Image (cartoon, rainbow, N blue to C red):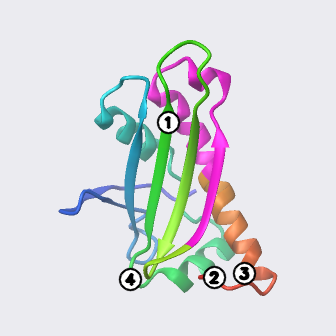
Amino acid sequence: MLGVSAAWADDGTEGICMTVRHGIRLHVDGMYGGYPHSVLRDAVLQGVACPSDEAERHVFGLIADPPPHLRISVTRPMGQGQQGAISARLFSQGHFVIGERMSLSPLARSQSPFSVTSEINLLMARLWSDLAERISHGGRAIP
C-alpha cells in the first residue's frame, strides 16, 4: 500500500494518493454515532488504500486524467445493536467506474470511528483488486 497524503481543496474534497499520477479527489460523507464529521474524515483518511501493485497502478493510469473522484460513505446509527455500513464509489470523467460496500464489524459498531480504519483499508484493497481483475478479463475501465 502506498502512503496516503491529503491536501484540502476548495470544493470540499481532499487530494489523496498524490504519489500515484495526479492523485484522487476524496469526498467523505455519512455519520458515525454522533461523532463530529471531522473525526470521521480523519478515520477514513487513515484507512484509505491507494493502488499498490503493478496491475492496480496500470488500471489507475487508465482513469487518472483528470484525477478521479472517490466517495466514501460511512454510516453507523446511534444505539445498541444498530447495523452500520461503509461504501466506496469511484468516478472518472463524470462516470461511475466501480464501487464496493460492506457491513461494519461488531467491533466497529461499538467503538470510535477510528475502529473502522482497517475495514476501510480492506474495502479499498478490494475495490482496486476488483477493478484490476475486470480489466485483466477484457473489461473497460469506465463502463
- In terms of sequence position, does the residue under pointer 4 or pointer 2 come before the other? 4
Spatial separation of the CA atoms under disc 3 and disc 2:
11 Å
Given the image, on which type of amino acid does mark 3 rest? Ile
Quadrant where the N terminus sits is: bottom right
User: Mark 2 and 1 residues: CB-CB less than 8 Å, in contact?
Assistant: no
Cα separation, mark 4 vs mark 1, equals 29 Å
- Above or below, comparing residue 45 to residue 110 in the picture: below
At horizontal 62% and vertical 33% (from top left) the residue drawn is 104
Q: Of the residues shown, which amino acid type is indicated by label 4?
A: Pro
Residue 66 marker: 4
Q: Mark 4, mark 1: which one is toward the viewer?
A: 1
Q: Where on the picture, by quarter, is residue 102?
A: top right
Report, in whole angstroms, how far the alpha carbon at label 1 lies from the one at label 3.
Answer: 30 Å
Q: Secondary structure at mark 1?
A: strand
Q: Which residue is mark 3?
A: 135
* Mark nearer the N terminus (3 vs 4): 4
The first of marks 3 and 2 along the sequence is 3
Q: Can you identify the residue that label 2 sits on?
A: 143
The one nearer the camera, 115 or 90, is 90
Answer whether residue 43 is magenta in the image. no
**In this picture, is 22 found above or below 122?**
below
Secondary element at tag 3: helix
Q: Kindly identify which residue carries mark 1.
A: 75
Which callout, 4 or 2, points to the residue nearer the camera? 2
Report the front residue among 84 and 46: 84
Q: Amino acid at mark 2?
A: Pro
Q: Residue furthest left?
A: 10
